[in-house]
Image: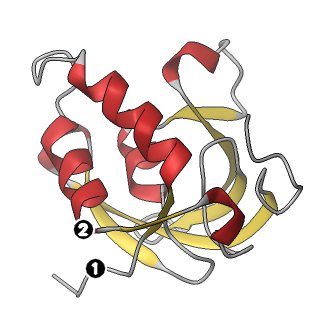
Amino acid sequence: MSRKPHLILSSLDVDRLEALLAQMSAAAFPGKADLEAEIARADIVDPTDIPPDVVTMNSTVTFDMAESGKQFQLTLVYPKDLDGSTEKVSVFAPVGSALLGLSVGDELAWPSVGGKSMTVRVTGIVYQPERAGELHR
């Protein structure tokens, strides 16, 4: 497996995610340990210090799946913000966990449903709250 890309996370996102993760069992969220490991290896910075090309919570991201070549544009949200929209993905879904903290141009292999691996490659960030000055969303 290739070296994992550098991750940058907002301290605000990490605080919220750690609070949610603390309430979840590994049975309820099979990717819990993987996401916790990603958070543990990330650089955690103040929201004002997030680079404009990094995927943060509530960012709208364009990405593709290396295996299928399919392209997507989704907004990365907390589970409570899922509303059945096909334009949102939960941070607790495999692809959501994989996207968090990546920069444009990064790719990350991530375990998906059924034990297969998928490779997510970030191709652009359409909207990022920090870049828009929305630091306390």
Question: In the image, is 49 to the left or to the right of 113?
Answer: right
Q: Nearer the viewer, mark 1 or mark 2?
A: 2
At label 1, which amino acid type do we have?
Answer: Lys
**Residue located at (54% from left, 68% from top):** 69
- The disc label shown at residue 15, or none: none
Secondary structure under the numbered disc 1 in the rendered image: loop
Q: Badge 2 is on which residue?
A: 41
Observer-nearest of 37 and 94: 37
Mark 2 Cα within 10 Å, few/some/many (few <14, many 20+)? few
Q: Position of residue 42 (x, y in %)?
A: 34, 68
86 in relation to 91, above or below: above
Q: Farthest residue to the right: give it.
A: 132
What separation in Å lies between label 1 and label 2 (alpha carbons)? 10 Å
**Residue located at (50% from left, 80% from top):** 106
Mark 1 Cα within 10 Å, few/some/many (few <14, many 20+)? few
Q: Badge 1 is on which residue?
A: 4
Mark 1 or 2, nearer chain start: 1
